[in-house]
Image (cartoon, helix red, strand yellow):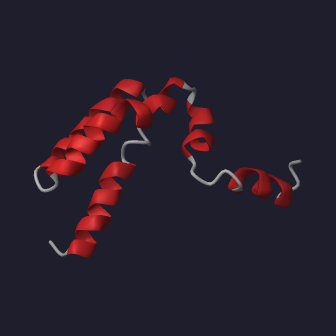
């Protein structure tokens, strides 16, 4: 598989983690993705193992709160609310 195509697959596989409905399902998906990546990228698999608790900590919150929590653009929400007149 070409490198670009592989990166797209890896990104999509990791993206499947955050759409799970429950904390248990999210952890199972995280481990499944880590195991799939571990074959070709052992260091990435080990990194995912070490980061699991930190990355999935947001799963203790209700689903409606998760998107704002795991969003990495902290300015996006307030600016978007101002543009849409929600403030």
Measured as percent of width and height from the top left, residue 50 is found at 29, 35
Nearer to me, 15 or 44:
44
Give the position of the N terminus as an image quadrant.
bottom left
Residue 52 visible in the snapshot? yes
Q: Residue at the spot x=22%, y=39% of the render?
A: 32
Which corner quadrant of the image does residue 76 belong to? bottom right
Measured as percent of width and height from the top left, residue 62 is found at 57, 27
Measured as percent of width and height from the top left, residue 85 is found at 88, 55
Q: Residue at the spot x=27%, y=62% of the render?
A: 9
Measured as percent of width and height from the top left, residue 39 is found at 10, 51
In the rendered view, does 75 fall on the left or right side of 36?
Answer: right
Q: Residue at the spot x=19%, y=49% of the render?
A: 43
| Count of numbered marks | 0
In the rendered view, does 27 fall on the left or right side of 66?
Answer: left
Residue 21 visible in the snapshot? no
Q: Residue at the spot x=42%, y=27% of the render?
A: 22
Which corner quadrant of the image does residue 46 belong to? top left
In the displayed structure, 53 sits above or below 30; it is above
């Amino acid at each position: 598989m070409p490198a670009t195509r592989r990166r797209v697959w890896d990104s999509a596989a990791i993206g499947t983690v955050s759409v799970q409905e429950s904390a248990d399902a999210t952890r199972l998906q995280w481990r499944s993705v880590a195991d799939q990546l571990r074959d070709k990228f052992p260091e990435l698999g080990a990194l995912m193992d070490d980061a699991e608790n930190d990355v999935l900590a947001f799963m203790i919150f209700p689903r409606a709160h998760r998107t704002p929590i795991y969003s990495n653009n902290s300015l996006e929400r307030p600016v978007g609310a101002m543009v849409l007149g929600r403030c």
